[in-house]
Amino acid sequence: MGRRRSGMVTLTDVAARAGVSVATASKALNNRAEVAEETRARVRRAATELSFRPNALAQGLISGRTRTIGLLTDELGGRFSMPVLLGVENALGNEEMSVVLCDARGDAIRRQHYIRTLLARQVDGFVILGESNDVRPSLTRDIPVPVVYVYGESSDPADLSILADDTGGARLAAGHLIALRRRHIAHITGPESYRAARDRAAALRAALEEAGLDLAGGEPFFGEWSRRWGRHATRMLITAAPEVDAIFCGNDQIADGACEALAALGRRIPDDVAVVGYDNWEALAADCRPPLTTIDLNLEQLGAAAVEHLSAALDGHRTSGVMRQPGRLVVRESTGPLPRHPGN
């Protein structure tokens, strides 16, 4: 009985009861084809008779997996990374799996070192976390286990990339402002070099055209992802297009700066000008004056979706291409309530 500490039944016990090797018992319980049906039935019967319930380590021996995922990021301290990581961790906990986190800090040599380190630890798969929802070079050729890219699109269309839906988010913002009967809607956003900025600007313009409206100010105001740019661009915008009655901003920092500038210019929010941000960075958006209507990227759900598809790949159900996770509109005081219909 020395083998059964505290009454625990092991895979070795099952193998001995069935009269097979531990390796054969593992293959039989994992339903591997190379095991004869009679042997498989004998092993399963032994497992049932012994009430064998594999713990995580034993389950790893049975399935050939370590139940560990490698998560490789380039920006651990970024405010986009942490919610995605939380979503990954929560989803892995539900799967009784664990994660080993490595931050390459944007360094290619460090990134390759971590890939080798994680492979040496025999992780079952990788989640590669981007930093800008933009295209990044594929790393899959260096990784012999399933890989899912999240918040960053792999350059290889054979990979699976799960992204935030920038086009859909911009359309949510535009639809909200149009429903508020705003007719002179402008756009202040970050650098034009960012695909997210370009996609949101294009989606806003398309939504306005469908509603028979022009973009106030003529063109999007591309600049920086900062409060300072929000203040500066808003002053330029109001000078060039004083009729502006709504501003859709490329992130919450820009929107906060826009609100500051509008207040300094004597424009009331939302009475004179409605303001919508992007990202739902709650520490900023909820504390803005007034609190900021914004688009939430659902980053935790993005991380959970990455785990879901990685788990499917580990079970042989691999997906490729690009999947875009919808965001949601969070309405606060910077846009005010929707107008009441006549008779309400």
Image (cartoon, rainbow, N blue to C red):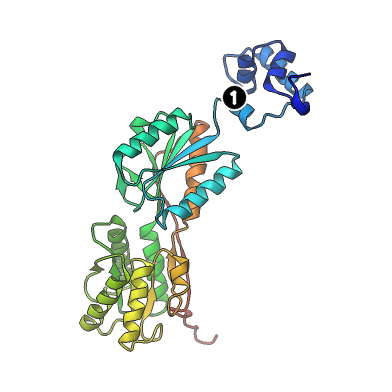
Point out residue 111 in the picture as x, y percentages from the top left corner: 34, 39
Mark 1 falls on what kind of element? helix
Residue at left 20%, top 81%?
240
Residue at left 33%, top 39%?
110
* Closer to the camera in the image, 49 or 316: 49
* Closer to the camera in the image, 215 or 162: 162
Q: Which residue is mark 1?
A: 61
- Does residue 149 appear left or right of residue 35 in this picture? left
Report the residue that reaches farthest toward the bottom. Answer: 266
Report the residue that reaches farthest toward the top. Answer: 19
Against 294, is 79 above or below? above
Against 260, is 85 above or below? above
Label 1 neighbourhood size at 10 Å, few (<14), some (14-19), many (20+)?
A: some
Point out residue 272 in the picture as x, y percentages from the top left corner: 36, 86
Q: Quadrant of residue 177?
A: bottom left
Report the residue that reaches farthest toward the front. Answer: 2
Residue at left 23%, top 57%?
193
- Does residue 199 appear left or right of residue 342 in this picture? left
Residue at left 55%, top 43%?
92
* Closer to the camera in the image, 177 or 311: 311
Point out residue 25 in the picture as x, y percentages from the top left corner: 65, 17
Whether residue 245 appears in this view of the structure is: no
Q: Quadrant of residue 140?
A: top left
